């Protein structure tokens, strides 16, 4: 096309002279600019469409990912470490989540927060032993932990109440009084799957969690007994926690995005909406053999519409 336009312009000069060339090239340049502009607009429109599709796909994956759990290996190399700003929970917090103990033994820590002033500001183990703000809450004698069983656990506290309370499966099992005026230390690290022996590190094999976590959330308020019970009663696959909005400061779906060290993998805990939908469809649909080699599917409601039951009473 370009070569043809040039040839036409050259031929035009034989009858129109130099002014004809200028006019012809002016028309040619205008056409070229217009075509380039239209091509650019077309390209941008397609890029926007692709970007939108990618955004929707990415958002869908993030929504589905929030229903994953985390499974930890049993060594000191298996953990998730990050450094959040803890100012929102400096004077009150509630740490709640679903815990599945797999490794035998005591002092297997599934969460820990440590500041430079104290490397054990918050650290719950999977056997009923808790430590927060220089205070021990030892509930091991009140907890029977069955390995391979999901349990809902909550640790709540506030500067006002000065009370660190422990809940198992929605039931308050014990509490301890924290020092007057003592707040959560700032500038520290959070680790999932172990606890700190020094600021920001020094993990031990015997403290490795080695179990599974799901829906661990850190709230910026001291939840009351009814709120904790509501979460536990809602069950593993509920979305009760989400109703707390911004009070859910460290969110489970955000923790899943943090860098994982060692043998830490995301697992399906059976709460995916698509999986639950398939289970419901399987429950409501059965397969029968109506003729030899001929299979069909029908709903349980279809059975009630059959001759044996339809319009029958008594």
Image (tube, helix red, strand yellow):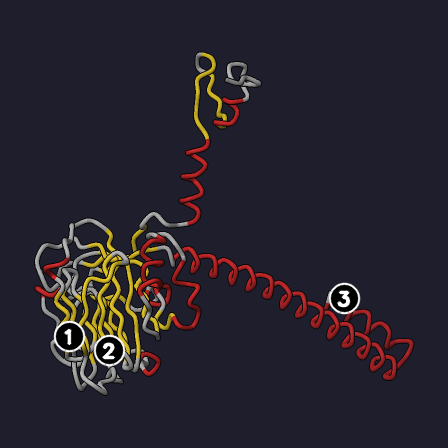
Would you say residue 284 is visible in this rendering? yes
Residue 85 left/right relative to 297: left
Earlier in the chain: of badge 3 and badge 1, it is: 3
Q: Nearer the viewer, mark 3 or mark 1?
A: 1
Residue 193 screen position, x and y as percent: 20, 65
Q: Residue at x 52, y 60 (%)?
A: 56
Would you say residue 70 is visible in this rendering? no
Q: Which residue is mark 3?
A: 4
Nearest the viewer among 54 and 31 is: 54
Disc 2 versus disc 3: distance between alpha carbons? 69 Å
Q: Write down the quadrant of residue 43 in the picture.
A: bottom right
Q: Quadrant of the N terminus?
A: bottom right
- Label 3 neighbour load within 10 Å: few <14, some 14-19, many 20+: few
Q: Which mark is residue 189?
A: 2
Residue 181 screen position, x and y as percent: 23, 87
Q: Residue at x 51, y 27 (%)?
A: 301
Q: Which mark is residue 196?
A: 1
Residue lying farthest to the front in this orientation: 314
Nearest the viewer among 182 and 122 is: 182
Residue 29 left/right relative to 59: right
Earlier in the chain: of badge 2 and badge 1, it is: 2
């Amino acid at each position: 096309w370009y070569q043809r336009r040039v040839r036409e312009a050259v031929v035009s000069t034989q009858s129109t002279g130099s002014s004809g060339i200028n006019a012809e090239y002016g028309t040619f340049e205008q056409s070229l600019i217009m075509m380039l502009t239209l091509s650019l607009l077309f390209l941008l429109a397609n890029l926007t469409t692709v970007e939108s599709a990618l955004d929707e796909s990415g958002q869908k994956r993030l929504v589905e990912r929030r229903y994953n759990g985390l499974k930890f290996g049993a060594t000191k190399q298996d953990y998730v470490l990050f450094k959040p700003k803890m100012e929102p929970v400096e004077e009150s917090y509630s740490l709640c989540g679903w815990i599945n103990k797999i490794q035998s033994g005591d002092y297997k820590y599934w969460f820990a927060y440590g500041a430079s002033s104290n490397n054990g500001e918050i650290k719950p183990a999977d056997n009923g032993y808790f430590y927060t703000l220089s205070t021990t809450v030892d509930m091991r004698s009140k907890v029977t932990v069955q390995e391979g069983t999901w349990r809902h656990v909550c640790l709540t506290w506030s500067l006002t109440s000065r009370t660190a309370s422990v809940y198992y499966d929605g039931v308050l099992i014990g509490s301890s009084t924290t020092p007057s005026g003592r707040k959560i230390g700032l500038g520290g690290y959070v680790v999932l799957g172990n606890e700190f022996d020094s600021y920001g590190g020094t993990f031990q094999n015997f403290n490795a969690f080695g179990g599974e976590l799901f829906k661990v959330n850190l709230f910026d308020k001291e939840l009351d007994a009814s709120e904790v019970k509501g979460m536990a009663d809602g069950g593993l696959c509920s979305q009760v926690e989400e109703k707390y909005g911004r009070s859910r400061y460290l969110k489970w779906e955000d923790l899943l995005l943090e860098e994982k060290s060692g043998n830490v993998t995301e697992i399906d805990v059976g709460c995916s909406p698509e999986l639950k939908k398939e289970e419901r469809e399987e429950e409501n649909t059965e397969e029968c053999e109506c003729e030899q080699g001929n299979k069909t599917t029908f709903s349980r409601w279809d059975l009630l519409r059959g001759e044996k039951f339809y319009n029958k009473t008594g």
